[in-house]
Amino acid sequence: MVETRSLATTDPFSATAAGAVWLNHAWGFELLLYGVYVLAGLMGVIVLQGLVVAATFGVLYGLLRTEGVGQGWSLGLLSLGALATHGFWAPRPQLVTYLLLAVFARTIADYQAGRQNRLWWLPILTALWANLHAGFLAGPGLIALCAAGELLGWALDDNAGRVGGLARARTLASWAAVSTIASLANPFHYRALLYPFEIMGDRLSQAWIVEWLPPPFGHPQVLVLELFLGLMLLLALGTARPVPWRDLVVLLPMVHLGLHATRNTPLLVIVATPILGRTVASFAGAQWGRLPRFGRQAAVVGALGLLVSACGLVAGSREPARVWNAFRPVFGVAAHAFPVGAADFLSREGRRGTLWNEYVWGGYLIWRLYPDLRVSIDGRTAVYGPERFREHLAVVELEPDWQTVLGRLAPDAAIVRSRSPLVAALRASGWVVRFEDDVATVLDPPGRNG
Amino acid sequence: MTAGRAARGALWAATLLLVATIALSSLTVFDFWWYLASGQLILATRSVPATDPFSYTALGRPWINHMWATQVLFTVLWEHGGRLALIGLKTAAVVATFAVILATMRMRGVHPLLAAAGALLAAWTGAEFWHARPQTFTYLFIVILVWLLRPGWDGRRATLVLVPALVVAWVNLHAGFVMAFLVIGIAGLGTALPLLVDRAQRGAGWRILALTGLLGATAVVASLLNPFGVRAILYPIEMVSSVPFMTSTIEWFPPNFHHGGFFALELMLLLLFPAFAWGRDRLSAVDVGLILVFAHLGLTAVRHAPLFAVVAAPPLTDALQGAMGTWRRVDWTSVREAVRRRLPSIGPALTAPGAPLLAGAALLLAAMSGYWTAMGLAPTNPLRLDLDESRYPGRTMAFIRENRLPPPLFSVYAWGGYELWRLYPEYRMFIDGRTHVYGRDVLRDFLDVTNVAPRWQGVLDKWHVQTILALRASPLTATLLAQGGWRLVFTEGEAVVFVRETDANQPLLTRLARKSREDGSGGVEATARGTTPGAETVPVALTPGRSHRPAGETL
């Protein structure tokens, strides 16, 4: 974009989808990221990432405190949320969605509680959001959910919960509509609104891309998410007043999203944290004060002990390394996750042409090898479409037609996970290994001179 | 009998018939076949084998066959009544499970319509697990145990007798008996805790804790009454702590909520939130403990989803009734009067005390009739498919046997049980559903070959494998076809058979090639063109609902 001073609307990066329509919904974020990278390098990107994460949790902390949640509880809940979402805070456009969703949650909560009405911010923020990440619909969606919550709360909550519900529902519904209209202010207009639905309607990528799969319950980190939800259930048993329906209406669709896709975990945590905070505040008011000081200390120590024991026993006893691997911090480009050595090799060799590559490495290889080498696939699934994605899977899964598909693509080299069955199959088919390390293997097709 | 009781009876009968329909529609998975082989062996030798007789990779290794009694029962029924007798048995067990659930709901005062809805939701949650497998007994026994440990259990002497008796039967039918200890612990702690925090009742709390310890100890002693003694208790613990086993067996994976089969599980989980918030007065500490513990188990492994469903259904339904009770009340009396006034001819019938229940029963019966009418001629009719060998590569087994393909045989995990049933004792298995018998090394060997890991050829050489049965669309087949050294000799639907090309096997390969050319049946020529002639074999589902792993082939 910087070089051409224009927004590409067709794919320039791949060998398989060259010229296909590319709805680059995250163009604003990409420019921002590139600008930071040019000015401050990879460390600048990491600092930006840290700032956005800190801002997101800062907004949530402020909201919790405003809702009357004690300092200790607030920090505890945010720590739990941070553990549950560890690993999601990568420098991707999703960061914007997380921050703005927290801002939306704060603004709506302030309005619902009668503290401050700043709902007019939301359409402006939505317009900005629509140029930074395709998750922008989460904003108007949250407003609409809160409107539905107010409506149901008016119908079902106890008397205290009903006051003013209908009026608030009307106001929120109006702002949801205005925000949706504001989201049209992007280079792709209404097509940007349809884009998230296209992605979510693509059954194939939903079934095969790890971040779209449901959370692997039993994993130490997902155990924290489970604890987060379990805590919500347990505290709901002891609140002064039952958790209002207006909160349940917002919470349940988010739990649904969280159960369906790992990538929705941060959305669930961000939206559920204020609800959990209100529940905690109500619980603490009703039950916590009854306990003597020693009892409170014992409860905190017991809860912490329970958390540690649960994580340790359930996950650690099976494979202690999993606990560390789940939570260990990783800075910069992780060499074990990306084919750094293989990309160095291809670059050193001055290779040109087309590549067959693993899906998860596509973005990295574009960054390292474009324009000399063009990838077969990368994370922009909408550009490639279901048919190209199916072809990619046919090769990865060694389906009966895998050689035909690969022959049609006729790549100049393949870059494959070193321990994948595909390496053995390619070798058996006469492909020649040119480079190999623990992460990736580079193979040339039969007949290519080394 | 009053009209109200008759109407409730009709509704519950209709509910149980629909539960039976759901159970009948659940097709039994692959493990079933080796139960028959094992049952036959036990009946023939009049003893329970303590070491593995079926495989060549674990021959002679200890085998804790914790479900020997189920296998004997299945074999006797199979030999005398065929598959329909077994389908009848599993359906009866599932219906009995839900009869206990309905009885528990009635005891809790749940409205019959809500009880029917809750039971059907639970039946739907476990819809893909109501198999002719020993687990089905665990589902039944756990609801009986929860019933025995209902409020007031500490004052009923019968509990102290019936619980150990239940455990004795359970331990010989399925390893899920360890759940009994969990339920006893939760029931004991859940009953004692509210008393312990109340200074005035603390003594009673300690008494219940002591009683729980006694009941638990009695249950442990009762569970020793099995052919393997204490090893049967240790076995489930060993199994769940085995990393290779847990990370490679699909039914131990977490549920994949993309799959429609888990929609009901998700619905049950979501309903917990309004139930805990607004129906909390109807939930005891025991209910909360059971729900949360089994929800965790259900989220961690798909095979526990039915356990969560059957355990959580009564308290969840009860709490939802409590939640609905907080809504602004509808004045049903005035509604009834209005109906009678406006519809004088049928109004009295519509507003009779049992009318909603009868209407519910009629609706359920109509739904069930519609389902079976639609299924009557359909090829997917579960009554035709369940436990039917047409879902397995039967012609492949016949081909291997008739042509005496050279052993040892490497094969597909999902077909291991069926192969064992069809090919033993002429052929022994590389692996089958009894994963715990094989241990981590054999499991790793199997996965390395299936995943074509770097040492896959070394593993085949190590075990001197001469014949491979593989899935047609698999990395192993693709590699064998591309690499050579193995001759494709037969295909049937999803199954392909390779024989190692060695001098010793050459006469057989020549004979098979000649035979193939002469009668055009099976193998070499046809498959060289990439087609799959032969019988249409319904692919065997490896899992109820496709669970996922980020990478790597799984069992």
Image (spheres, rainbow, N blue to C red):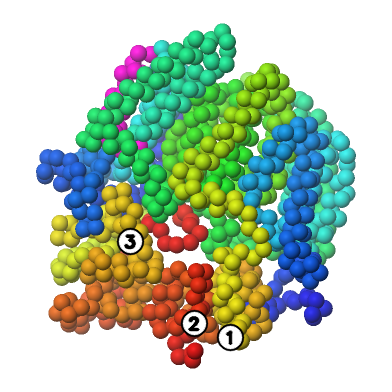
**Residue plotted at (27% across, 64% down):** B410
Q: Nearer the viewer, mark 3 or mark 1?
A: 1
Q: Is residue A448 visible?
A: yes
What chain does badge 3 belong to? B
Residue B374 sits above or below residue A68 on the image: below
Q: Earlier in the sequence, mark 2 or mark 1?
A: 1
Label 2 sits on what residue type? Answer: Arg
Q: Position of residue A21 (x, y in %)?
A: 69, 75
What chain does badge 2 belong to? A
**Distance of label 3 from label 1 (alpha carbons):** 38 Å
Q: Is residue A190 visible?
A: no
Label 3 sits on what residue type? Answer: Phe
Q: Nearer the viewer, mark 3 or mark 2?
A: 2
On the same chain: label 3 and label 1?
no
Considering depth in this image, is B34 or A372 the residue closer to the camera?
A372
Residue occupied by mark 2: A434
Label 1 sits on what residue type? Answer: Glu
Residue occupied by mark 3: B446
Discs 2, 1 touching: Cβ within 8 Å: yes
Q: Quadrant of residue A356?
A: bottom right
**Distance of label 3 from label 2 (alpha carbons):** 29 Å
Q: Position of residue B553 (x, y in %)?
A: 42, 62
Q: Main secondary structure of the magenta part?
A: helix
Residue occupied by mark 1: A349
Q: Which residues are magenta?
A: B156-176
* Quadrant of the drawing holding the N terminus of chain B: top left
Dot 3: within a 10 Å radius of its alpha carbon, few (fewer than 14), some, or many (20 or more) residues? many
